[in-house]
Amino acid sequence: MSSGTLHLPSFATCSAEQAAKYEEDTYQGRWSLLSYEVFWQERYVFLKNHGYQLRPRFAPDWTPSWIGTHYNPFFCEDSIYSMKHIIVDATRISDGARVTIKTVSRASDEIAIGRFLSSNDLLQDPRNHCVPVIDVLDDPHDYSKGMIVMPFLRPFDNPPLRTIGEVVDFISQTLQGLCFIHAHGVAHRDCAAANIMMDARSLFPQGHHPVRLNYSPDGVHEISALNRQDYPVKYYFIDFGLSSRFEGGDVPLVVGTKGRDKEPPELSDSVPYNPFPLDIFILGNLYLHEFVQKYHGLDFLNALTVPMLQHDPNHRPSAQACYAIFQGIQASLTESTLRWRLRSRQESAPERVVYDTVAVAREGIYRIKHMIV
């Protein structure tokens, strides 16, 4: 990106003195590529030749776009660091779609399992909530590694869920997804909160920046999300780096204590355990910590989380049985309950009065609109 093509709003400008200071800071390395960004810069041309364009910051001949201008670097897209070491965002040149590229070890099963779950037949199954593998590339500089190309996703709780119905939808999708992978012999083994993301394009029809998630694609303007109750999203399991696949008469036993959730009692580096009940515990723990313990009014989920969190793995229900329990819970909830707001357990009494008043007003507007329609 050259300074000659940089056009930003007036609020992005600064004084001549400040611009000179920014330029000095730039030459002293304040906005230089981080070590893990250099990794991707070295693969910039390779990825472009294979149809994937990294952001201007990663170009081998990059010159910061604010040099020689009166623009504050904060508002210049190429000043924005990548936040993750083994992952980078990119644009698919053929259609402009945003993608994520992840470097992985070829010694792991992540590529094979990802390809299996993304096969044409399995992609047609509506229960499939595994992030699709778009492409797999060989690393041109390290033959022990590969690069997986996937759709760009964002954390499932950014923006936060706002209604009981949105929580119910999240649980429905993730339980269906767990039923799907278990039915095909795959245990995720790390299906914690950080490894569930969403395709949020419906919430941001004009797009958003891949690092500054709540900013416009150019990183300049703060933006707001639409309501996921009106514009549904799809949730996906990501990161199959610890996953195991079992076929035919394979005995489903593993060892290992890696993973984000350290609470499952069976985790061991020496005593084999069944990874399928482990998934049940991890997902149940997510529901407990992210929803039941955070918000009032979700105690009805205890009928699901209590059996999922049984200390003895043999006493936990299967994924399909969990989904059956959930369907019974879901059938008992009214439409007005599903539309009701999530009320944080940290909320003060005055806040509750205000937010409840707004929620009642919204419910009234909703009912009037649907009476008219």
Image (cartoon, helix red, strand yellow):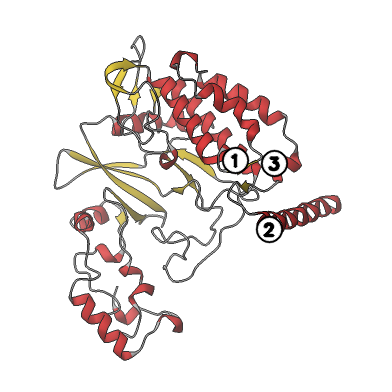
Whether pointer 2 and pointer 3 mark residues with C-beta atoms closer than 8 Å, the reply is no
Q: Amino acid at mark 1?
A: Val
The mark nearer the N terminus, 2 or 3, is 3
Task: Please state which amino acid type lies under the numbered disc 2.
Answer: Pro
Mark 3 nearby-residue class (10 Å; few <14, some 14–19, many ≥20): some
* Marking on residue 338: 3
Position of 66 relative to 213 (above/below): below
Q: CA distance from mark 2 to mark 1?
A: 25 Å
> How many residues crowd around disc 1 within 10 Å: few (fewer than 14), some, or many (20 or more)?
some
Q: Nearer the viewer, residue 112 or 350?
A: 350
| Alpha carbon separation for disc pair 3 and 1 | 9 Å
Q: Which mark is residue 309?
A: none
Q: Is residue 274 left or right of residue 325?
A: left
Callout 2 environment at 10 Å: few (<14), some (14 to 19), or many (20+)? few
Q: Is residue 125 visible?
A: no
Image quarter (top left, top right, bottom left or bottom right) of the N terminus = bottom left
Disc 2 versus disc 3: distance between alpha carbons? 24 Å
Numbered badge on residue 167: 1
Drawn side of residue 261 relative to residue 38, left or right = right
Front of the two marks 2 and 3: 2
Task: Say which of marks 2 and 1 sits in front.
Answer: 2
Mark 3 or 1, nearer chain start: 1
Q: Position of residue 86 (x, y in %)?
A: 27, 48
Badge 2 is on which residue? Answer: 350
Residue 350 falls in image quadrant: bottom right
Q: Residue 185 location, x and y as percent?
A: 40, 20
Q: Which of the 4 image quadrants contains residue 368?
A: bottom right
Where is residue 316? Give x, y as percent: 50, 18
- Spot the residue most to the bottom: 16
Asked if residue 352 shows in the view, the reply is: yes
**Looking at the image, which is closer to me, 184 or 313?**
313
Label 3 is placed on what type of residue? Leu
